[in-house]
Image (cartoon, grey):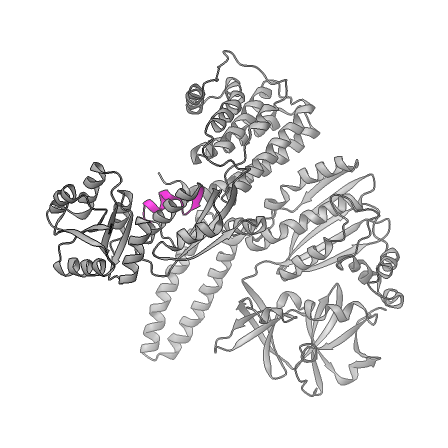
Amino acid sequence: MALRIMVVDDALFMRNMLKDIFVRAGYDVVAEAENGEAALELYQETKPDLVTMDIVMPKKSGIEALQEIMASDPHACVVMVSALGQDSLVLESVESGAKDFIVKPFKEDNVLAIIKRITA
Amino acid sequence: MDMSQYRGLFLSETREHINKLNQLVVTLEQKPDNRETVDALFREAHSIKGMAATMGFDQTAQLSHHLEDLLDGFRSTGKVPASTVDYLLDGIDLLEGLLDDLQSDKPERSVDTYLAETPQQQPVGGAEIQANNPEEFLIAVAVEESAEDTTAKGLEIEAEAGSAVAIISEGSGQEPTPEEADAFQVLVDLAEDTPAAAARGILILRELEKSGVLMSSKPEIAALRSGAPCRQIRAWLRTSLTKLHIEESLLRISGVDKVHFVDDRRKGESVSREEKTRTIRVRTDLLDQLVNLTGELITNRYMLRSASSGLDWQQLSQTLAQTSLLIDDLHHHVLQARLMPLENITGRLPRIVRDLSRKTDKKVTLQLNGTSVGIDRAILEELTDPLVHLVRNAVDHGIDKEGVVTVSARREKELILIEVADDGKGMNPDLLRRNAVERGLMTSPQANALSDRDALMLVCLPGFSTAQKVTETSGRGVGMDVVKSAVVNLGGTLEIISEPGQGSRFQMRLPLSIAIIKTLLVSCAGRSLAVPITRVQRTLDLTTSEIQQSGQNRTFRLGEELVCLFSLAEALGLPEVAAGAITWVILTDVQGRRIGLEVDNFLGHREVFVKSLGFPLNLLRGLSGATVEGNGQVVFIVDPQSLLEDRQLFTNVGRI
């Protein structure tokens, strides 16, 4: 069965871009969320195999959402998506249990390599 | 709290304490009932314990704690039984080994065996603490660690600690044990500009943790957590997986550029050498002076700027003159900051002499003179092995049954002279000549043509040894050549002075600093070359009539002495410029013999910053480095010693 992915980002542009990459690679994008709160709800609902999580978002930040997801599901597989220059936020995410991180601007190959590695 | 920043300081300071421990034990052996020595020993061990415990270096802390307790027991009587001295020395060796481990990022070796061998006479404390249960033991030690006043009771706990720890490690049979698993260093290079490198580093360490037992890493995970910069991760890993497997899994991580492995011991040592040079203690008043000087230079810069924008030539030249004074001053002070007393490396010598004289059944006294002289840190470190070797040689070959080995140091203008002398049987030039011929290193006429002084230098030829039999410590014929090349590499010279029955003196002359040196700038075959001033004894201008042709060689007379003359251009393989009425000559010293080096002209003195030559230029003989002139021209630095040593050794022209 194809890998089931949830994409979390407040920018529709980014969500579409990631979604396209995943669909091209044969993955199944099962949910999209535009903030941390929605992400938490959809996570419980769809139980995806993997989450890509933007860090800076309204309502609930990506790090808070990550921490809550990890608390409810210690095996959750969350990959953070950050902009350049957010090193300390990335560090905090990794400390909070993120499996890896993608830095914008990213390349398709790079994103897929990261996904492949952590779901191997 | 992130302790890694204190690691370097811990290592260098503990080395100093170990040095002192070694010296003190040797003193103790000579005067066994000196209370002050026992007290001093106790304090050294106590200091190490405190530092090691703070750093969380468990085995080092345990061992120093044990030594401290042992010594504390002797403080009341002020006497240490002779039988305990060896035990103490073994303990100090073990401490040194532990430091080596820490320095090369390896896990600390176990001290259990040593602790179990404690001599019987130690005082026994009051209540015994049963530590069959590991948890109980941990509590007991925790209590003990926090208690400032350590008594003999602590010893009991430590003695038990060994077995308790053993039980713990036996119980956890999950991880591969050191014997069956492969332990090595993994170096992971991150690609340049990897974003969020610290976070990347943590992911790499996590991956490594999955592959086996991650024993330590640099940067440590704690440092990465606080966002430490990270271009390379060095991790010490124990694993049963193959390197290929580990490499593949690491390369899958985004941002990982290269993965390599180090399991060669020697490479590990070079890493530790790197680290050794990293910390240096500088007096704060010296730092203040540096800050002041920098401040003045900044002011100077503004003055220069205003002079140049106002085209005020007088102000410009005045300010420039001031700037150069300030830079001189700054240079002087920075050099000061790099100086360390020779004591830092002679501290080990008493112990070495003691062990060696015991082993060879000789009575040798070691005298140290002038060891407070300061030497550039970089030179000092390179000097450690040569010095130890010379001292070993003196004990092993120089002294027959009983004698004195003297290590002395003093400043000679821009040089430091370090001499290792013995009052032993001396060296016999004839024996050395014969030996060289027997070993096929030269023909008999060649050997006979050597001056006595040159014959003594034969011991520095690779493959030459006069020792009747090979001993454990020296005399394998490797050694003196290594000593000599180490000294020459540092820009120094080695000289041997000896006569049969009169003892031997090995003199090393070394520059004060190797980064910035004074040179004599000369022109030679149409280009500028620099000769280190330490290599120039004096300069001469000779008229054509003063130079004589004798066989293949040109010579000139200097007082009583007949000196060989060589052309620098010819020696470097450059086209020679026809000599004018006057021949400009640098008087220098090659293997203890004076020679003249002909150049086209003298261009003046320069202080130059030496840059080392990269491959393949470093293969060129006779060039020790290069520097860049004010006009951007690259000027090579000539080392007459290495340039001429071969041809010099087998001529006898210089003899009177």
Which x, y percent locates residue B158?
51, 23
Residue B458 visible? yes
Look at the image and tell me in which quarter the C terminus of chain B lies. bottom right
Which x, y percent locates residue B514?
57, 61
Image height of B3 relative to A85, above or below = above
Look at the image and tell me in which quarter the N terminus of chain B lies. top left
Left or right of B194? Residue B470 is: right
| Magenta stretch, residue numbers | B215-227
Image height of B219 relative to B166, above or below = below
Of A79 and B501, nearer the camera is: A79
Left or right of A74? Residue B554 is: right
Left or right of A59? Residue B437 is: right
Residue B219 magenta-highlighted: yes
Image height of B543 relative to B209, above or below = below
At x 78%, y 59%, the residue is B457
Residue A56 visible? no
Of B458 and B539, nearer the camera is: B458
Which x, y percent locates residue A32?
14, 52
Which x, y percent locates residue B221?
37, 44
Image height of B537 relative to B372, above or below = below
Residue B53 magenta-highlighted: no
At x 34%, y 61%, the residue is B193
Of B539 and A40, nearer the camera is: A40
